[in-house]
Image: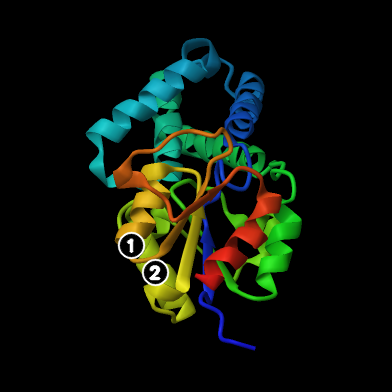
Amino acid sequence: MAKRRYALITFDLDDTLWDVGPVLARAEQRVEQWMRTHCPGVPERFDRVALMELRRQLHRERPELRHRIGALRLEAMRLALVACGHDEAAARRLAAEAFAVFMEGRHDIEPFAAVDAVLAELARHYVLGALTNGNADVFRLPLGRHFRFAFSAESLGASKPAPAHFEAALRAADVPPARALHVGDHLEHDVLGARRAGLTAVWFNREGREHDGEHAPDAQFRDFAELPALIGDLEGK
C-alpha cells in the first residue's frame, strides 16, 4: 500500500465536535443554581450577564489571563464574591467550588451526528490530536479515547491562530507540516492558523457560510459523515 499523504489529523473542539453555545448556557445555569444555595447574595447582584461583563473587563485589564479562560472565570467569580462581602478565604473556596460545578457542566456535551464513529474510523489510520482555545478537556469525555494528545490555549500560553498549537501538535506526532491536516469551524483560528503553519486546512462549515480569499480552506464539509471521504480525496491529490 502506498504511503498515506497524512499521518496526523488535528481537531478543534468547541463548535467543531459539538455545539458549544447550549453547553455553556447550561453550565452557567448550573452555577447560578448552585450559588443561590451557597452564596445567594452573588446571583442577586451578579447575574450571568454581569459576570460575563466582569470577565470581559478582566480580559481587557489582565493580559496574563487572556489565554487562561479557566483562570479568568475563576478570578471573576472570586471578585464577585468579595464584592458581595465574602472574605478572601471564603471567596477563594466558594469560587473554586463554583468553578468545579461549571466544569462539570462544561463537559456535559452531545457530539454532532457521526462524530464518534468518524473519529473511531480515522484513529485507525492517523494520529489524532485536539487543539482548542477553550477549556474543555477532551480526555474527560468518551471522545477522548480517539485522541493521542490535546493542547489548549491555557497550556500553551497562546491562542489560535498563533502557531504554537500547530507546532506543538507537529512535535507531539513527530511529523512535518505537509503530513498534517487540521479540522475546525473558525476561519481565522483554524483555517488561517493551520494554513500559515503549513498544514492542510479543512473547514467544518456546518451553516454553509462564505469565506474570502485570505481564509480559503483547502477543503470544507457540512456533515461529519462526509469527512472520511473528503480526506480520502485529499490523500489522492
Above or below, comparing residue 206 to residue 87 in the picture:
below
Q: State the image quarter where residue 26 is shown.
A: top right
Residue behind mark 1: 164
Query: Farthest residue toward the bottom?
Result: 1
How far separated are the C-alphas under marks 1 and 2? 6 Å
Compared to residue 213, the image places residue 162 above or below, namely: below
Image spot of residue 78 (x, y percent): 43, 32
Tags 1 and 2 touching, CB below 8 Å: yes
Which residue is at the far top?
Answer: 44
User: Would residue 160 be seen by someone viewing this image from the given angle?
Assistant: no
What secondary structure is found at the residue carrying circle 1?
helix
Question: Quadrant where the N terminus lies?
Answer: bottom right
- Residue at 61% in and 67% down: 232
Dot 2 corresponds to which residue?
Answer: 168
Q: Is residue 105 above or below residue 119?
A: above
Looking at the image, residue 19 lies above or below residue 39: below
Q: Out of 145 and 90, give the one closest to the viewer.
A: 145
- Three-letter amino acid code at the position of disc 2: Ala
Q: Position of residue 209 (x, y in %)?
A: 48, 33
**x then y, percent, for residue 128:** 58, 68
Which color mode does the image show? rainbow
